[in-house]
């Protein structure tokens, strides 16, 4: 393979088969939504169901919201762009990130939902700190970062559609957004949870199939490394010291950046409200149930995700650096084009459905969270006399609004590299809520002062720090430590210097 493969040209037959596959997946989600409509008739059941969902559905739904368009498309763009050094940010720590969320946060969220009737993640924080301010502030912080992350989901779908058809992705994504809106407003949390589980199965199969196909196509790991070395030996380096040690490339070019990727993944799953919220509708689980949910998470978020990163490397060996010249999609085109070359219509269609399943599962999980944050955690707690019927209507309206905002942003100015853009949201959410949510469930001394200081610092440091990263003043790994350690400092110091909840209230929370 001395000469690189030419970039696949748009083919109407690929577009037709992909459209059929995506449409079928979406209409099954609509069916699931309508089948669940009887469990979403009240405001509270619409937000979090009836705490009766079992381990298999919960595990699949958790995996689907965790992976997103970043994992099924963006991570391939990273390894395509920089080679093996991209593995640290593109998959090495993925399973390490999701397991703490499962083991340390899941049971607590289920308990809060069952015992205290919480319906959202900020609602749980409001109960934990006995504070409306904490509840509303955390809702706003989550909305801010999740809008950024939601943009990435639409960009994943847009990139895929461009690769297959060469046409503007407007109508395809508009169609997908409308379908998401329908099954969410009809089925509420329960319908969304079952749709997420269905989408989790699809994306897991799609990623696994494409990854195995990519390895077979290139001739195995040894052949892959030979092709990469022939193009540029630096693609084999585990740390690309030839790249700038500041800016986004620090994650691949510096030990500081590599270590930072571990902490990004360790905190982001536990800090992502759309992941943590998967446990709000879960029934109380026994040891066997926890084994099942762990198995589901591993099957979808384990081997398939590692294979995703390999797919990006195979794409680089296949196409060379050609894709980096295609604006604004660049390396994010790696997996779609490779699917077209190695698998023809069957694998391309399966992968297309998998990407849309991943993107829309995370999008729907986030949109449900954001809409509930507005109605439950801001409107209702400050105006408790407002009727349940009005709150339910408002929630459905906000679902539409929070689908429209990232949709518009994606087409106005899509981010250049999907994984990096979404990384900023991961740093902010993870750095803040690994303390305010996960640690607060176990540390009695945590106070609302510490939580508020942590959230304020986390937002400001992420915003200001991202500017310095974009201007090549600091590295993205350095930003991770600035946000994470700073949030921890303000959380612990603020808590230790302020008065904790009364002992009787703490006893109810921790018994």
Image (tube, grey):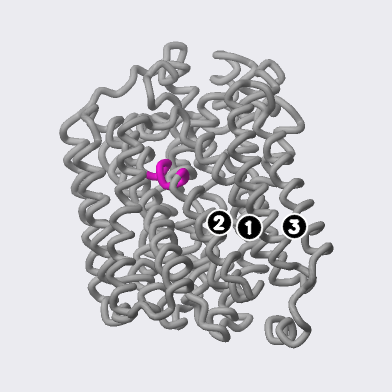
Q: Can residue 77 be seen in this view?
A: yes
Query: Is-magenta flag for residue 149?
Result: yes
Q: Which of marks 3 and 1 is nearer the N terminus?
A: 1
Q: Which of marks 3 and 2 is nearer the N terminus?
A: 2
**Residue for badge 3:** 491
Q: Earlier in the sequence, mark 1 or mark 2?
A: 2
Query: Is-magenta flag for residue 271?
Result: no
**Residue for badge 2:** 272
Q: In this view, does 374 lie above or below 265?
A: below
Quadrant where the image shows the N terminus: top left
Rendered image: mark on residue 155: none
User: Image check: 503 left or right of 85?
Assistant: right
User: Image check: 143 left or right of 342?
Assistant: right
- Name the residue located 25 percent from the left edge and 70 percent from the top edge: 186
- Under circle 1, the secondary element is helix
Dot in front, 3 or 2: 3
Q: Is residue 461 above or below residue 241?
A: below
- Name the residue located 59 percent from the left edge and 33 percent from the top edge: 466
- Name the residue located 58 percent from the left edge and 74 percent from the top edge: 109
Gap in angstroms between the C-alphas marked 3 and 2:
18 Å
Q: Can residue 215 be seen in this view?
A: no
> Looking at the rendering, which quadrant does residue 453 occupy?
bottom right
**Residue for badge 1:** 433
> Residue 476, image x and y in percent?
65, 32
First to last magenta residue range: 148-153
Local packing at callout 1 (Cα closer than 10 Å; few below 14, some 14-19, many 20+) is: many
- Under circle 3, the secondary element is helix
């Amino acid at each position: 393979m001395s000469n690189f493969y030419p970039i696949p040209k748009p083919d109407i037959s690929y577009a037709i088969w992909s459209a059929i596959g995506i449409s079928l997946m979406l209409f099954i989600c609509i069916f699931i939504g309508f089948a669940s409509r009887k469990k979403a008739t009240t405001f509270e059941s619409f937000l979090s169901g009836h705490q009766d969902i079992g381990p298999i559905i919960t595990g699949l739904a958790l995996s689907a919201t965790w992976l997103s368009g970043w994992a099924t498309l963006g991570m391939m763009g990273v390894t395509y762009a920089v080679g093996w050094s991209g593995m640290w940010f593109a998959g090495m720590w993925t399973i390490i990130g999701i397991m703490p969320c499962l083991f340390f946060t899941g049971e607590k969220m289920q308990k809060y939902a069952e015992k205290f009737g919480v319906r959202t993640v900020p609602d749980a924080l409001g109960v934990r700190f006995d504070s409306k301010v904490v509840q509303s502030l955390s809702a706003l912080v989550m909305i801010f970062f999740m809008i950024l992350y939601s943009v990435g989901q639409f960009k994943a779908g847009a990139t895929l559609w461009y690769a297959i058809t060469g046409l503007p992705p407007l109508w395809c994504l508009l169609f997908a957004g409308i379908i998401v809106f329908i099954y969410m407003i009809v089925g509420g949390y329960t319908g969304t949870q079952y749709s997420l589980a269905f989408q989790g199965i699809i994306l897991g199969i799609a990623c696994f199939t494409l990854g195995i196909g990519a390895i077979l196509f290139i001739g195995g790991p040894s052949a892959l490394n030979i092709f990469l070395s022939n193009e540029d030996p630096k693609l084999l380096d585990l740390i690309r010291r030839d790249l700038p040690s500041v800016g986004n490339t620090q994650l691949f070019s510096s030990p500081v950046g590599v270590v930072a990727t571990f902490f990004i993944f360790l905190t982001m799953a536990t800090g992502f409200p759309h992941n943590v919220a998967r446990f709000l509708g879960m029934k109380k689980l026994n040891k066997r149930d926890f084994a099942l949910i762990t198995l589901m998470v591993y099957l979808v978020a384990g081997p398939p995700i590692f294979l995703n990163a390999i797919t990006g490397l195979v794409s680089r060996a296949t196409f060379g650096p050609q894709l980096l010249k295609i604006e604004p999609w660049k390396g994010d085109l790696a997996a779609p084009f490779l699917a077209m070359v190695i698998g023809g219509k069957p694998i391309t269609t399966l992968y297309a459905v998998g990407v849309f399943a991943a993107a829309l599962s995370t999008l729907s999980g986030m949109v449900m969270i954001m809409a509930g944050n507005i109605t439950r955690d801001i409107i209702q707690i400050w105006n408790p006399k407002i009727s349940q019927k009005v709150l339910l209507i408002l929630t459905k309206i906000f679902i539409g609004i929070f689908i429209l905002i990232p949709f518009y942003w994606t087409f106005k100015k899509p981010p250049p590299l999907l994984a990096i853009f979404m990384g900023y949201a991961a740093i902010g959410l993870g750095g803040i809520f690994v303390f305010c949510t996960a640690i607060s469930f176990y540390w009695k001394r945590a106070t609302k002062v510490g939580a508020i200081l942590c959230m304020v610092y986390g937002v400001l440091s992420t915003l200001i720090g991202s500017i310095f990263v974009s201007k090549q003043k600091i590295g993205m790994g350095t930003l991770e430590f600035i946000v994470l350690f700073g949030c921890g400092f303000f959380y612990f110091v603020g808590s230790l210097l302020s008065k904790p909840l009364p002992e009787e209230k703490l006893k109810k929370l921790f018994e």
